[in-house]
Image: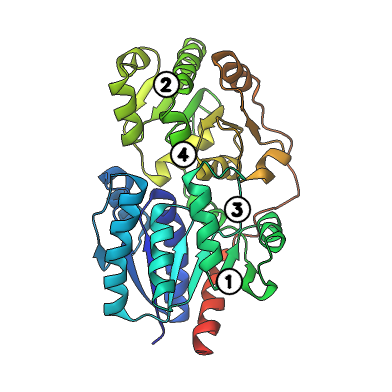
Amino acid sequence: MKKIVSVVGARPQFVKAAVVSEQLRRVGIEEVMIHTGQHYDANMSDAFFEVLGIPEPRYNLGIGGGSHGEMTGRQLIEIEHKLLDERPQAVLVYGDTNSTLAGALAAVKLHIPVAHVEAGLRSFNQRMPEEINRIVTDRVSSVLFTPSRLASDNLRAEGVAARQIVEVGDVMYDAALRYGNTLAASGDRHSFFLVTIHRAENTDSPQRMRAIVDALKELGRRARVVFPVHPRTRQVLVRSELWDELGRSIELVDPVGYIEMLTLMRGARAVLTDSGGVQKEAYFMGTSCITLRDETEWKETVDLGWNTLVTDLTRDNIVTAAVAAIAPPPSTLRPYGDGHASDRIAEYLLALLQDH
C-alpha cells in the first residue's frame, strides 16, 4: 500500500486534514498522521479530532509553546525521527504554521517529496512568521496544491515550475460545505458580533490591543459581542490587566469547536478577526468580515466585498467598519473552487505515488 505522512498541529490544519484524510482512505493511501501538539489546549485540538472524525494520530509530539525558533527546532528533530521510522513515499503539510515548516524541512532533508496544501498564499509582509513559513515551505515542496488562481499566479511570478503547481481549490471550502450543511438554523441571525484575535502583530502590541479592547467595549454597548479567546490572547489580556475590563462589556468564552464556530459565524452580524482561516469561513457562511490587520492573504474576499481591512487600528476605525458591515449581494464567482479540492488532492497523490 502507498504510504504518506501528514503533519498537523493547529486548528485550521485539523479541519483541512478531516476532509483530505477521508479522501486518502477512499483511494487506498495509508496515512500516518503526526500531531506536533502546537495547539495543545483540549478545546483547540482533541475536540476537533473527535467532532470531525479525524483518525487518531499515530504520533502526538506534545510540542507547544516557546519561541518560534525553539518550537520549530524541536518539531523538526522529532518529525525527522518519525519519518526515519515510517519511511513514507511523501509528506503532506498544510497551511503556514511552524508545524508546516518543520514537517517540510524534515522531509526534504531526507529526500522525501513534500506536498503543500494551501500553497501560494502571500501577504507580502515578511514580518509575519506565517509569511516566512509559507515562502520556505513552497520553495522546498515538490507539489504545490493551490486554493485559487491568485495563489497559482503568485507561484508563477516567483518562478515556480508549472508542473509543480496543481490548482485544486480550497479544502476549507470542502469542509464548510460538508459541515455547514449540518448546522441548525440560528434564531438570532445578525444579532451579535463575533471576535477572534490571536496574531502576534496584534497581541504583541500594547497600542493595538488597547485599540481593539476599546472598540469591543464600544460595540458591546451597542450589541452582544462574543469573543472565544485563544489561550495566548487570554494570557496577554490578563497580563496587561485588560481581561476584567473587557469582560464587563462583552462575552469572553473559551475556544469553541469547529462546528460551533461555524454556527456562530453563520449567526453573526459580522466577524472581527485577524485569522486567515476565519476570514474565509465567514465568507463561506455568508457573513461579513472585518480584518484587523494591515494586509490579508485572502485578497479574493476583499475584492468580492465580503471582507474589510482595517489597517489603521484605532477604536473609531474598528467600530465604524463593524457597524457599517453589510453582506454584499450574492455573486456567481467561486474563487475557491467547487468543494472537491480534497478529492483532487487524493487522486493526484495516488497517481504520483504509483509513478514512483
Looking at the rendered structure, the kind of residue marked 2 is Pro
Residue placed under numbered mark 1 in the picture? 344
The location of residue 128, given as percent across then percent down, is 50, 42
Callout 1: helix, strand or loop?
A: helix
Question: Which badge, 1 or 2, comes first in the chain's sequence?
Answer: 2
Q: Tell me the CA gap for discs 1 and 2.
A: 44 Å
Looking at this rendering, what residue extends furthest in the bottom direction? Answer: 355
Residue placed under numbered mark 3 in the picture? 121
Residue at point 44%, 50% (across, down): 12
Above or below for 211 versus 181: above
Q: Tell me the CA gap for discs 2 and 4.
A: 31 Å
Callout 4: helix, strand or loop?
A: helix
Of the residues tagged 1 and 4, which is closer to the observer? 1
Q: Residues within 10 Å of mark 4 (few under 14, many from 20)?
A: some
Q: Tell me the CA gap for discs 3 and 2.
A: 28 Å
Nearer the observer, 232 or 221: 232
Q: Tell me the CA gap for discs 4 and 3.
A: 27 Å
Looking at the rendered structure, the kind of residue marked 3 is Leu
Of the residues tagged 1 and 2, which is closer to the observer? 2
The quadrant in which residue 239 appears is top left
Residue placed under numbered mark 2 in the picture? 206
Looking at the rendered structure, the kind of residue marked 1 is Arg
- Which of the image's four quarters has the N terminus? bottom left
Label at residue 263: 4
Question: Which badge, 1 or 3, comes first in the chain's sequence?
Answer: 3
Q: Residues within 10 Å of mark 3 (few under 14, many from 20)?
A: many
Q: Tell me the CA gap for discs 1 and 3.
A: 19 Å
Q: Is residue 178 visible?
A: no
The location of residue 260, given as percent across then percent down, is 40, 40
